[in-house]
Amino acid sequence: MKKETVWFEVEENETITDCMERMSKQGFQVAGRREEPLFAEVDGQPVPIRQIILLKGIKEVN
């Protein structure tokens, strides 16, 4: 058996629970979480905009 791995991004207008439900509908279960900061440059300085939340989904493939 091989496990398929896909990273799902929590969209801006979506809750983590909504993303988990979307993953479940596609046959994936949560196996991890990663957060990355998103920056924009303002007057030559990096300014944090928001956190990008990624959920790792796994699905067993026969």
Image (cartoon, rainbow, N blue to C red):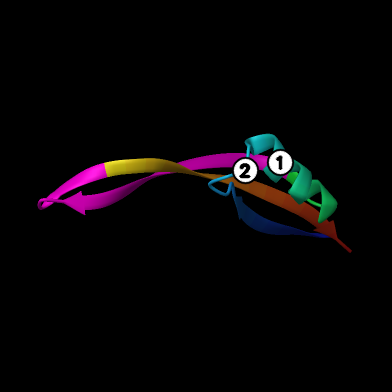
Check disc 1 and report its element: helix, strand or loop.
helix
Horizontally, is 36 left or right of 13 in the view? left
**Residue 4 point in image, percent of width and height:** 74, 60
Pointers 1 and 2 in contact (C-beta within 8 Å): yes
> Which residue appears at 77% of the width and 43% of the height?
21
Check disc 2 and report its element: helix, strand or loop.
loop
Is residue 8 within the magenta segment?
A: no
Horizontally, is 24 left or right of 11 in the view? right
**Residue 36 point in image, percent of width and height:** 42, 44
Is residue 35 within the magenta segment?
A: yes
Q: Which residue is mark 2?
A: 14
Residue furthest to the bottom in view is 62
| Magenta highlight range | 30-47
**Image quadrant where residue 19 sits:** top right
Residue furthest to the right in view is 62
Q: Which residue is mark 1?
A: 18
- Circle 2 packing at 10 Å, graded few (<14), some (14-19), many (20+), is few
> Which residue appears at 34% of the width and 43% of the height?
49
Q: How would you classify the magenta stretch by its main secondary structure?
A: strand
Using the image as rendered, state which of residue 24 and residue 4 is in the foreground.
Answer: 24
Q: Mark number for residue 28?
A: none
Which quadrant would the C terminus be assigned to in this image?
bottom right
> Which residue appears at 29% of the width and 41% of the height?
48
